[in-house]
Image: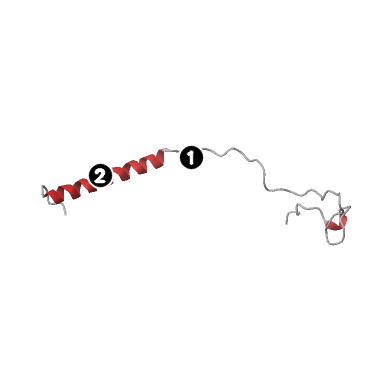
Amino acid sequence: MTATPPDPPPETTPGLEPGGGVNPGDTPPDSGQTSGLSHAQPMPSRRAPIIVLTVLAVLVVLVLGAVVVSIMGIVEVF
């Protein structure tokens, strides 16, 4: 089963000229629309990005600390 098209059939629509145009001053027939208001979108959680950024920051600090300690010769890391 197929859905009916949202536009009215041109052969039964009054006021259309041949080829589907309308007379000057006429309003074209109304058709279905896909745009408009929808339900409010939920706000995404901010928890996951904050956790990821925190973990990355901790890893960067640990790696930089290991590099500095290795360069200073205190502990042989690499």
| Disc 2 packing (10 Å; few <14; some 14–19; many ≥20) | few
Q: Position of residue 37 (x, y in %)?
A: 65, 40
| Residue 74 x/y as whole percent | 10, 47
Crowdedness of circle 1 by 10 Å Cα count: few (<14), some, many (20+)?
few
Quarter holding the N terminus is bottom right
Task: Looking at this view, name the residue that lies furthest to the left.
Answer: 74
- Residue 20 falls in which quadrant of the image? bottom right
Vertical placement of 9 versus 43: above or below?
below
Determine whether the residue tagged by mark 2 lies in a helix, strand or loop: helix
Residue pictured at 88% horizontal, 53% vertical: 15
Name the foreground residue: 26 vs 37: 26
Give the farthest residue toward the front: 24
- The amino acid sitting under disc 2 is Val
Whether residue 77 can be seen here: yes
Q: Secondary structure at mark 1?
A: loop
Q: In this orientation, does residue 1 appear? A: no
Of residues 73 and 41, the one drawn nearer to the viewer in this rendering: 73
Q: Which mark is residue 33?
A: none
Q: What is the tally of numbered marks visible in this picture?
A: 2
Q: Given the image, on which type of amino acid does mark 1 rest?
A: Pro
Q: Which of the labelled discs sits on residue 61, or is there none?
A: 2
What is the CA distance from the residue labelled 2 to the residue labelled 1? 28 Å
Q: Which residue is mark 1?
A: 44
**Which mark is first along the chain, 1 or 2?**
1
Q: Give residue 13's position: percent from left, percent from top.
A: 86, 53
Q: Quadrant of the C terminus?
A: bottom left
